[in-house]
Image (spheres, rainbow, N blue to C red):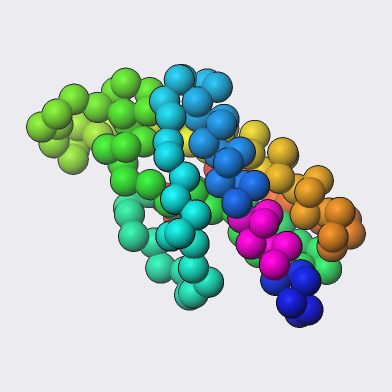
Amino acid sequence: MSSDHKEYLKENTHLFVQNVAQSIEDMVGCTFEIDTESYTEKAFVPEFGMTVSIHFAGKVQGDYVVVMDEKTAAATIDAYEEGMEFEDLKAMREDYGGFIKECLNLSVGESIPALEQNFGEITFSPPVVVYGELE
């Protein structure tokens, strides 16, 4: 892959992150600060328990992924209370997992056109993977 395309992938990553943060803010008013200094290109190893992803393919292929601590995901929809047990959180997965899934769908829809400008037509799989299960 050319260095121009690698640079563009970084730019598209930033666009995607901005779109996710903006989608969450638009939907529930919760804001996130974006730290571009934390961007690194490395093997994907999720740091938190909740992973939501959509696959895309074309001249390039990959995944748009949101990885988030479940407490944070629940807090975005005001479903988390301090000291809540994991089992209580787990019972609400459908609610906050569904919310993050919808944010991901919106964000991918906003990010794909920019990716297509440099790489041609991209297709993405409408099903979203949440907690390792296809939805």
Image vertical order of residue 37 relative to residue 101, above or below: below
Q: Which residues are magenta?
A: 7-13
Does residue 18 appear left or right of residue 114 in this picture? Answer: left
Residue at 52% in and 36% down: 21
Does the magenta portion include 46?
no
Nearer to the camera, 37 or 119: 37
The answer to whether residue 105 is seen in the rendering is: no
Front residue of 18 and 81: 18
The main secondary structure of the magenta stretch is helix
Nearer to the camera, 118 or 72? 118
Q: Residue at x 84, y 60 (%)?
A: 118
Locate residue 83: give its quadrant.
Answer: top left
List the single residue furthest toward the front.
37
Residue 41 placement (x, y as % from top left): 53, 71
Give how far across and how far down residue 85 sits, in percent: 13, 36
Residue visible at 57% across and 30% down?
23
Q: Which part of the image, by quadrant, shows the C terminus?
A: top right
Instruction: Relative to 53, say whether 100 is above or below.
Output: above
Whether residue 112 can be seen here: yes
Position of residue 46 measured from the top left corner of the image (x, y, whole percent) = 39, 61
Q: Name, please, the residue furthest toward the left.
A: 83
